[in-house]
Image (cartoon, grey):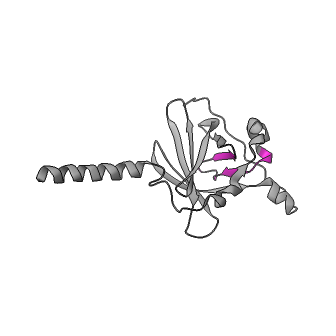
Amino acid sequence: MKKHLVTAFIAAVLGLILQACSPSGSLIAHQRSADFYGQFVNPAADWPQAESKIDELKVLQTSSEYPMRYVLFDNGKFYYQVDKLGNGEGVWSYENGALIVTAQRTIFKMELAVSAAKETGDETIVRFYDRHGFNEMPIKLRNPEALKAQGKSAPQLRNFTRSEKNI
């Protein structure tokens, strides 16, 4: 009998650990419908020129404290720029009420979740683990087309600091 209890306890603990380490676990702050995230997505036709057209595209970006940019496309691909890490591409999907974004780097798999920051409202956050542990920060949409329709011009993107680390 004790053996079964110990086995059940170990299985429960392992299940909790696996859930906490997965994007559908601890990385999602507040779930939203897929429609909520549609505002962040660019047409797939712009995918091949993502790097050269980044100023004209919808960009999810963080502050200069931990500078990251993500450009999502409706074909499930994305282009990214992360200062001191590099740029590249990966895939995204809508899962469990959030955008799950993954890319394979040379020595690790980049995985993060973009989700609503609160139960209500339009604020979004990005959550991920890096070599320092768990991170959570606001991520904002820069949408040049919407600003142009309002008679405004989009603020210039901050210069991207390239990295030669190739990690």
Is 124 placed above or below 70 here? below
Q: Is residue 99 magenta?
A: no
Residue lying at the far right of the rendered structure: 151
Camera-side residue: 62 or 58? 58
Residue 78 in sight = yes
Above or below, comparing residue 40 to residue 53 in the picture: below
Measuring 65% from the left and 61% from the top, which residue is drawn there?
36
Q: How many labels were placed on the picture?
A: 0
How far across and down, in percent of the image, does residue 2 sit? Answer: 12, 53
Question: Of 2 and 28, which appears nearest the observer?
Answer: 2
Q: Residue at x 50, y 56 (%)?
A: 28
Is residue 154 in sight in this rendering? no
16 on left or right of 143: left
Q: Is residue 87 above or below residue 155?
A: above
Range shown magenta:
55-74
Q: Position of residue 41 (x, y in %)?
A: 70, 51
Q: Which image quadrant: the C terminus?
A: top right
**Residue 45: image x %, image y %?**
78, 41
Determine the image quadrant of residue 117.
bottom right
Picture quadrant where residue 88 is located: top right
Q: Which residue does the image show at 64% across and 37% down from the upper left?
A: 89
The residue lying at 78 percent from left, 50 percent from top is 156
| Residue 18 position within the rendered picture, expressed as x and y whole percent measured from the top left | 37, 48
Q: Is residue 72 magenta?
A: yes
Q: Name the one closer to the observer, 35 or 60.
A: 35
Which residue appears farthest toward the left when viewing the image?
1
